[in-house]
Image (spheres, rainbow, N blue to C red):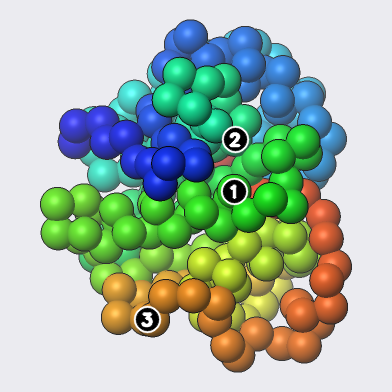
């Protein structure tokens, strides 16, 4: 798959490269990212190199693209977002954003851009995009809800993070779902609880 740059004029999503390794390494020192994402902790420069070489490059060569989130076309990485192929008609979104850029709606914009690409015939042409987050990650849930994901439930000890099983929430957005915030989320997700704007990576070691 060729690289696709996505933008709405506020954020730019482009494939991270080896030039971004040092910035990604610095970003992933943030404790809240390590708490909610399946990255190595502690996170070293070699982990960022592995991320580019083993996840980003082969992902774009297949059907699992990863983008760096930037605030201008040539700007530094402030987050990452990716779509991991589940099968020919389904993918799963994973993302993180640095604390300084949270609570501005940027990740919701990024998720919408990526979902639009995922559903497009000239994109991944999938019918379903799933989302998972460890229980307690209310900010990630807020992003998913505002981006039109429908809540589907709780998976008890359904994920593994660095050798430990954890409960996670499930939600999904279908190609036929209307845009905008989704109804049907339990009341606890409407109480303004906040934490890191991150979601589970779709592959171990995702930054």
Give the residue pinned by disc 3: 177
Residue 92 is situated, as x and y percent measured from the top left of the image, at: 43, 58
Residue 170 appears in the picture as rendered: no
Residue 53 is situated, as x and y percent measured from the top left of the image, at: 41, 18
Which residue is at a point 44% across and 59% down the rendered structure image? 112
In-front residue for pair 179/150: 179
In-front residue for pair 124/134: 124
Q: Residue furthest left?
A: 122
Judge depth for marks 1 and 3 and give the one in front. 1
How far apart are the two marked residues, 1 and 3, measured between alpha carbons? 21 Å
Please say if 183 is above or below 147. Answer: below
Circles 3 and 2: CB atoms closer than 8 Å: no
- Earlier in the chain: of badge 1 and badge 3, it is 1
Give the residue pinned by disc 2: 79
Give the residue pinned by disc 1: 106
Circles 2 and 1: CB atoms closer than 8 Å: yes
Image side of residue 105 versus residue 57, left or right: right
Which residue is at a point 78% across and 25% down the rendered structure image? 29
Please say if 125 is above or below 83. Answer: below
């Amino acid at each position: 798959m060729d690289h696709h740059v996505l933008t709405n004029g506020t954020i730019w999503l482009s494939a991270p490269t080896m030039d971004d390794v040092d910035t990604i390494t610095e970003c992933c020192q943030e404790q809240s990212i390590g708490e909610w994402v399946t990255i190595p902790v502690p996170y070293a420069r070699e982990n960022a190199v592995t991320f580019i070489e083993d996840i980003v490059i082969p992902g774009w060569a297949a059907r699992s693209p990863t983008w760096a989130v930037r605030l201008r076309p040539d700007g530094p990485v402030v987050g990452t977002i990716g779509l991991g192929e589940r099968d020919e008609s389904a993918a799963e979104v994973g993302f993180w954003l640095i604390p300084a850029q949270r609570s501005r709606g940027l990740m919701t914009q990024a998720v919408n851009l990526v979902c639009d690409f995922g559903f497009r015939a000239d994109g991944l042409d999938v019918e379903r995009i799933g989302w998972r987050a460890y229980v307690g990650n209310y900010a990630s849930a807020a992003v998913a809800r505002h981006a039109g994901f429908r809540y589907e439930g709780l998976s008890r000890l359904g994920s593994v993070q660095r050798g430990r099983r954890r409960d996670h929430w499930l939600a999904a957005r279908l190609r036929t779902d209307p845009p905008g915030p989704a109804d049907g989320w339990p009341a606890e997700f409407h109480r303004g609880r906040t934490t890191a704007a991150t979601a589970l990576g779709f592959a171990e070691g995702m930054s």
